[in-house]
Structure formats: structure tokens, C-alpha cells
Image (cartoon, grey):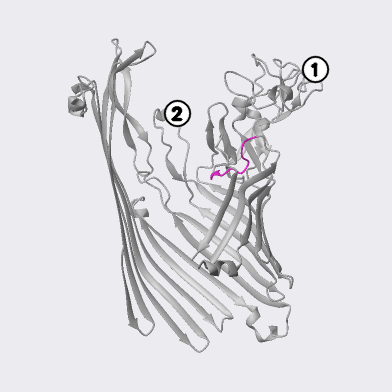
Amino acid sequence: MVFANFDFGHGITAESKFAFYLSEWEDNDFGPTYFIESTDYNNENWVTRSHNNRTQYTWNNLVHYTKKLNKHKLNATAGMTMESDENRYLSGEGYNAPNNHPDLRYIDSTEDTKRFASGSNNKSTRQSFLARANYSFGDKYLLTASFRADASSRFNKENRWGYFPSVSGAWNLAEESFMENVQWLSQAKLRAGWGQVGNDNINNDALLTTLGRTIYVFGTEREINLGQAPASVGNADLQWETVEDMNIGADLGFWNQRLTASLDYFERRSKDMLLATSIPYYLGSAWSAPYANIGTLTTKGFEVILTYRKEYASGFRMTHSMNVSTASSKITRLVEGEAIWSGNHQRLENLTRTVEDGVAGEFYGMVTDGIFQNESEVINYTDEFGNILQPHAQPGDMRFKDVNGDGQINADDRDVIGNPEADFTFGVNMNFGYKNFDLSMLFTGSYGNDVLNAVKPYAGTGSERYNSFAGLLEKAWDGEGSTNSQPRLAAVDNNNNFIYSDYYIEDGSHLRLKSLQLGYNLPKSWLDRVQISNARLFIGGENLFTLTSFDGLDVDLGGSALERGIDWGQYPLPRIFMVGANISF
């Protein structure tokens, strides 16, 4: 990194920073011919060599201006930034060298007709002009305004630039003269803000339709041939996604900051959202879904943060804080007006649906209505004309609702079966201290969100060669009245019990002890003897327990915009125990 600072006087300073990163590596591999036994051998050796070169740089140039006149304060910044990221890749491979000798482990030694090469040059650049000004009057009235102009190489020239303003203000009531006699209120600030930022988080080649190498069999001789097929579908009309935020809030303090509160109402509108979309089947082997500006997502919510501090003459002290937030989102506009399907599952097909006036990535499937307990229930489950709705069902099979009332149970009866968004999320941080001892605990959790157990189609059906959840046999239906939630386990399932339905949707509400730590600071008199300034011993742990009704390994699931709250069988957060010491000299 190279940087320079300049002071021109009169409150004007400037800075320039240039950072450069270079990475190069080479990879050489060889797979020999060998014969161990009839089921473990390789008749054709292979050689590969790959080169990868990556360069990145950023260059920031900023000018600052500071001015103070009586109660007026002004800080302003303007400048230009540039960044570049380039990755060059070259790879070659060959098959059937004469033997495994080290001197022949080169691509030129392999058979002429079995040599292949590939390479790419992946580059993206950004350029930005920015300006920001902060103004305050007597620390009572605060105003901030900023503007950005960003250009990205990931868009065509006509869409390359995006322009993003923002403005915010605050009124510090505690500094007003009429608040001088209000002793119980130590802080009172009202604030509001509005602003926009841009998003260009797409593939560098999202504009382009590309071809890739493919191998296929052709002709009566069934010869293996090399050819080209679509590898990605481009969209030349892509443009910046604009994320627009509006916030109204207040910061309050009571009784000399013993209790503080931060209250916020926010709205976020993501316009021209950039997302990968599904592609029609007639595009054949175009595996990479194209990006598009699909529409607008609006999110509204509240957040409350409370903190309480107290110290006692006995030496006991505590600081507790709690935050609770709620946010609900809605797709207010889709460009094509059609549903976007996502979450491709090997057995359940698409798991989520996104439509106008709906939640992004809502779970959409069949709706169940318990389990048939006897033959009479199967026969009497009919439409208005007396036709049996599930003629292939047996006692112990799942009963599916005829949602649209057409007298048939099929894909047209799918409905919204779950919402990945929580009614609210929360965190509680508790800190205690007594003389040299300290204890801290952090709890996190959510309430009201649904999660989709995408492992259940394998481990919850008792079929084929997959492992099953512990206790599945005992939970499954094995006679009238035994259960109304887990279907019978059978080698033949004519009722299709385990199609995508609300059977896979579970409550994601949970409470987790995220961290716990007990510490002891060694007395200062002890440390002075060995010339140590501070020493703290501690024991603790992380993810010590989680209270939830979810059957999977970990209920705290992330995901993407259209695939939230799905348990794909991710490795759970580990439970960690720690013993240690912090020592400073």
C-alpha cells in the first residue's frame, strides 16, 4: 500500500491511497495407470497443468474541508475512487502418455487427439465520484447529505452509471434550554434519514451468452465427439439495482444514562432487483440461469434496543442489553408478472415461489389434512358428487386437501404452506461483575418463522438406502389412532405420501445460548511482582444449547433472497468449550 497526506491549510486536507494485490499459482497433477484388482484399476493415465494469475488494486483520492465558526461546524469530503479485479486462468490436460515415468508427465507426451485446453480472463472495474457534507449548529441541529456516482463494467455503456443521493438530519433535544430542568431525561435525540445505494453484485459475464465445451455421442458408430453448447444466457439490458432506505428514530437516555433506548422504524425498497432467474427447458444445456432486474421488494419493520447499567457500593455491577426487531417484506412489482420459482430439490422440485404481493421465497406446496386412520375415512373423502378424492390411499396414508375444489388432488392444489420470515428476532446480552469476577451471556433467537426440512425426503421416509431419523419407526403410523402426522412406512407408496407438502415445514422459533464466559482478573498486587500489567483467566463456551421443536441439526438457517430458511443438511454450528488467559505486559 502507498499513501500520501497533504495539508493545504485553511481547513483543507487531502489523501491518496493506492493498494495492490498480486496472486499467482501453478498446479500440476498426474494420474498414473495401475492395476490392483479387477475392480480397482486405471488403464489410461492423465496429465494436467493449470496457471492462475490474479491482480487487484484500489485507488482512493479524497479532499476534506473542515470549518468552525461560532456554533457552526462543517465537515465536507469529496473525491474519486477506482478499483479493479482481474483473474486470468489457463489450463491444459492430456491423456494416454506412453507410461508413468516422471520424465513423461507433460501434456506434450500424451496422445495428440486427447489433449484439451481451456482459459479465461475475468475482469471487473468500478469507478466512483462521491461527496459528503456534515453540518451542525450548537450540537443541537445535525444535517448530513451525500451523493455518489458509480460506474461498473458489469453493465453496458448505456446503463453503466448509477446515481445515489442520501440525506439525514437529527435534533438533539437534550441540548435545548427548555430541557435543562428535566433531570430524569439525560439524552433525547430525534433523527430521520433517506438514502439510496447501488448494487452490482452479479457475475462479470452476466451480459454475455457464452458457449461451453460438451461431449456427445453421434452417428451409427457411436463415436464420442466434442462440440459446443450454451453455457450461460446473457442479458444485455441489466442495470444497477437501487436500494432505497428510509429511517425515523429516537435515542433516549434516562437517569444519567442508567437506562438507554434506541427506537427505529425503517422502510427499505429494493428496486430493479438483480437476481438469477429460471430458464425455459428449450434452452437445453444452458445450465447457468440468466440475471435480470426482476422487480421491487419492499421491507418495513421496527427495531428496539434497550440497555440498563447499574453499579452497587458492594462492588456488584451489571450491564444488560436487549434488542428486538421485526421486518415484513412484500414483492410489490415483478417485471414479467409471473412467479419466480427457486430452490431446486432432487425429490421435491422447486421449494419456493415469489409472486407479486407475496413474501419473497415463500414455501409453496401441497396442503395436508392429517392421516387416514381407517378404510372408512378413505372411502368417505369425496367431492360433491361422491367421487373418492384419493382412490389409491390406504389407512396410514396422508390426506391432501382439494384446495381449488375441482374434485382432483394434483399440482393445482398447491398453496402457500410456510413463511421464512420471523414475526420477530431478538438478542439478550447479560453482563455481571463482582470485584475481580465477571460473567457474560448472549442469547439469540427468533419467533414465528417457518423452516423447510429438505433432508426429510431422504431421512424421513424410511425408503431406499438412506439413513433415517432416530425414532422414525416408532413415530410412523402403525394402526388407528397411533399418529396423525407421520405416514406409514411402506415399500410401495401409491398415494405419493412424501410429495412436497406442509409435512416438510416446521416451526423455526428458537432460543440459543450463543456464548457464555466466566472470567477472573488476577489482583494487581500479584501482577506487579512479576511485571505483568493485566491477566485474566476465563472459561466459557459457544452454542451451548438451543431450545427448539425443529427436527434438523441446526435451526438457525441463512440462505439467499429467494431461498431462506431451508435446511439442506448443512453442518451445524459446533458446540465449543474454552479455557484460556488474556495477559498483557
Residue picked out by circle 1 = 374
Q: Nearer the viewer, mark 2 or mark 1?
A: 1
Q: Furthest residue to the bottom?
A: 70
Viewer-closest of 542 and 412: 542
Q: Which of marks 2 and 1 is nearer the N terminus?
A: 2
Answer above or below: position of 522 versus 182: above
Residue 554: x %, y % from top left: 61, 39
What residue sits 68% from the left and 30% below the top?
503
Q: How far separated are the C-alphas under marks 2 and 1?
A: 43 Å
Q: How crowded is mark 2: few (under 14 residues within 10 Å), some or many (20 or more)?
A: few
Badges 2 and 1: C-beta atoms under 8 Å apart? no
Is 559 in the magenta?
yes
Residue 1: image quadrant is bottom left
Q: Along the horizontal axis of the image, is 167 left or right of 287?
A: right
What amino acid is found at the position of numbered circle 2 in the picture? Tyr
What amino acid is found at the position of numbered circle 1 in the picture? Asn
Residue 535: x %, y % from top left: 55, 62
* Circle count: 2
Q: Along the horizontal axis of the image, is 385 left or right of 328?
A: right
Q: Which mark is residue 15?
A: none
Residue 550: x %, y % from top left: 67, 37
User: Magenta stretch?
Assistant: 552-561
**Residue 97 visible (yes or no):** yes
Residue picked out by circle 2 = 281
Secondary element type, mark 1: loop
What residue sits 68% from the left and 77% below the top?
186
Answer above or below: position of 357 versus 174: above
Viewer-closest of 522 and 226: 522
